[in-house]
Image (cartoon, rainbow, N blue to C red):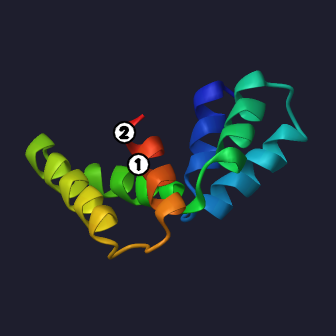
Amino acid sequence: MTRLDMINQCFCGESCEEILSSLEHLATQVQEKWVIDAITSMKSANPLGLKIFLRTIREGRSKNIEQCLETEYIAISNLIAGKISHNYYEVSSCFEQILG
């Protein structure tokens, strides 16, 4: 199985939880550093940030750059306004993940 096949197999999950589960299963079958790094990164990330990022990426497949930027603006505006979460720590953690 090529690396691209492994990536496609793991990241075709519908949710962050499914993707993480696929990565953990793959880690029992292969000794690849990128798999362990992906698991570690997902487990240390803010769950809300992961879900927002996954949805944005998935929706972005069928959008042009202007539409993608608009979606990001709306997501960040909703985080700031507290429409997604009123938990300040969770929101700031999401910003850190989204904006890098």
Q: Residues within 10 Å of mark 2 (few under 14, many from 20)?
A: few
* Residue bearing mark 1: 95
Q: Quadrant of residue 39?
A: top right
Q: Give the residue at the far front of this rendering.
A: 88
In the picture, which quadrant includes the C terminus? top left
Depth check, front residue: 15 or 84: 84
Q: Residues within 10 Å of mark 1 (few under 14, many from 20)?
A: some
Q: Quadrant of residue 38?
A: top right
Seen at 79% across and 25% down, the residue is 32
List x then y, in percent, for residue 55: 40, 60
Seen at 13% across and 45% down, the residue is 64
List x then y, in percent, for residue 75: 28, 60
SS for tag 2? helix
Residue 65 in the image: above or below residue 16? above
* Residue bearing mark 2: 99
Q: Say left or right for 37 vs 71.
A: right
Q: Amino acid at mark 1?
A: Phe
Residues at discs 2 and 1 in contact (Cβ within 8 Å): yes
Could you tell me if residue 43 is visible in this image? yes
Q: Give the residue at the far right of this rendering.
A: 28
Seen at 66% across and 62% down, the residue is 18
Per the model, the C-alpha gap separating discs 2 and 1 is 6 Å
Q: Say left or right for 38 vs 92.
A: right
Q: Amino acid at mark 2?
A: Leu
Residue 96 in the image: above or below residue 33? below
